[in-house]
Image: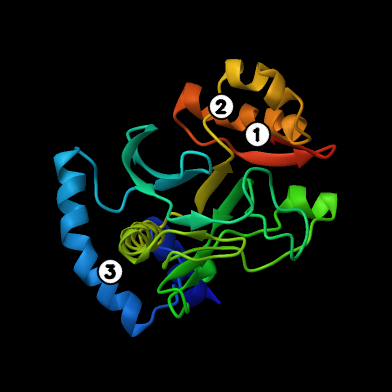
C-alpha cells in the first residue's frame, strides 16, 4: 500500500498521468500522417503556430468551407480553409434517419471517433445525434466528415483535403487535446441576413437564431464556446 502511494505521489510530482490516448490507426492513416505532416509543419512555422497545438473546426454549408483554427496564446487563429467537395440535402439540419440531410450544430470529436479504415479514404464521426438532437428525438447515425466527393448526409472533403484535416486532427489528439470541437453552420451569419424576409420565413429560422448565438460567441472571443443544452436550446459560455 505504501509503495502504491509513493508511486502515485511520484507520478503526480513529475506531472505524469495514468491516462493514455488510444487513437485507432491503419497502415493507410499512418502513411497519410507521415507524408502530410512535413508541409503542414512548415505552414504552422510560417504562421507562427506551434505544431500539436489545439485545433477547432468550423463548417459552412452555403460557402462550402471547412475552416481550421489553431490555438495561439489564449485565442484561436485561422490556419486555413478547405473546400467542401459535397454534402447532401441543402440548408437545414438533419432530423431523421433517411432524410438525406447533413447535420448542423455543435459537435466534438474524441479519439475513438476516428475511422482510419473508412471506405471513403479516411473519416471521422462528428457525433450526431448530440445532446440537443437526442432531446428533440432526432434519429440517424454514423454521420462523418470523410474523403471522396460523394455522400448522403455526410461531408465529403475529397481525398487530398481529408488527408490534411485528418493529420491535424490526429496530431492535436495525440498532443493531449481531449476533444476537438466541430461546429457546423448553414452559412456565415449576419444580422442583416437573418432579418431578410426570405430567411425569416424559413422553418429553420428559430433554430438558426440559436446557432447564431454560438457563432457570435466565437466571432467576439476567438475561443470556441462550451456548449450545453437547457430547455431544448443550445446555451453557450
N-term mark: 1 or 2: 2
| Res. 70 in view | yes
Q: 50 or 56: which is nearer to us?
A: 56
Residue 153 in percent (x, y) is at 62, 61
Q: Quadrant of the N terminus?
A: bottom right
Residue placed at 65% from the left, 34% from the top?
211
- Badge 2 is on which residue? 189
Residue 112 in percent (x, y) is at 53, 70
- Badge 1 is on which residue? 211
Seen in the image, is 180 located left or right of residue 25?
right
Task: Tell me the distance, in whole angstroms, between the alpha carbons under discs 3 and 1.
Answer: 33 Å
Secondary structure state at the residue bearing disc 3: helix
N-term mark: 2 or 3: 3
Seen in the image, is 143 located left or right of residue 20?
right
Question: Nearer the viewer's eye, disc 3 or disc 1?
Answer: 1
- The crowd level at tag 3 (other Cα within 10 Å; few <14, some 14-19, many 20+) is some
Q: 90 or 24: which is nearer to us?
A: 90
Seen in the image, is 110 located left or right of residue 209?
left
Q: Are marks 1 and 2 in contact (CB under 8 Å)?
A: yes
Q: Which disc, if any, is residue 33?
A: 3
Residue 53 in percent (x, y) is at 33, 48
Q: Is residue 217 above or below residue 28?
A: above
- The crowd level at tag 2 (other Cα within 10 Å; few <14, some 14-19, many 20+) is some
Res. 102 image quadrant:
bottom right
Res. 6 image quadrant:
bottom left
Residue placed at 63% from the left, 43% from the top?
91
Amino acid at each position: 500500500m505504501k509503495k502504491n502511494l509513493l508511486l502515485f505521489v511520484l507520478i503526480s510530482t513529475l506531472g505524469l498521468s495514468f491516462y493514455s490516448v488510444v487513437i485507432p490507426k491503419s497502415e493507410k492513416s499512418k502513411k497519410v500522417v507521415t507524408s502530410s505532416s512535413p508541409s503542414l509543419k512548415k505552414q504552422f512555422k510560417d504562421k507562427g503556430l506551434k505544431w500539436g497545438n489545439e485545433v477547432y473546426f468550423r463548417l459552412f454549408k452555403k460557402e462550402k468551407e471547412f475552416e481550421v483554427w489553431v490555438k495561439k496564446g489564449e485565442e484561436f487563429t485561422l490556419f486555413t480553409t478547405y473546400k467542401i467537395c459535397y454534402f447532401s440535402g441543402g440548408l437545414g439540419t438533419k432530423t431523421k434517419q433517411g432524410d438525406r440531410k447533413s447535420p448542423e450544430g455543435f459537435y466534438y470529436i474524441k479519439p475513438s471517433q476516428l475511422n482510419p479504415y473508412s471506405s471513403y479514404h479516411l473519416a471521422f464521426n462528428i457525433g450526431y445525434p448530440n445532446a440537443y438532437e437526442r432531446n428533440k428525438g432526432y434519429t440517424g447515425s454514423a454521420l462523418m466528415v470523410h474523403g471522396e466527393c460523394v455522400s448522403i448526409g455526410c461531408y465529403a472533403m475529397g481525398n487530398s483535403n481529408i488527408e490534411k484535416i485528418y493529420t491535424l486532427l490526429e496530431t492535436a489528439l495525440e498532443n493531449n487535446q481531449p476533444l476537438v470541437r466541430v461546429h457546423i453552420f448553414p452559412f456565415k451569419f449576419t444580422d442583416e441576413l437573418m432579418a431578410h424576409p426570405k430567411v425569416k420565413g424559413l422553418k429553420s429560422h428559430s433554430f438558426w437564431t440559436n446557432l447564431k448565438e454560438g457563432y457570435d460567441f466565437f466571432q467576439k472571443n476567438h475561443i470556441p464556446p462550451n456548449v450545453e443544452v437547457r430547455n431544448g436550446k443550445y446555451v453557450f459560455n
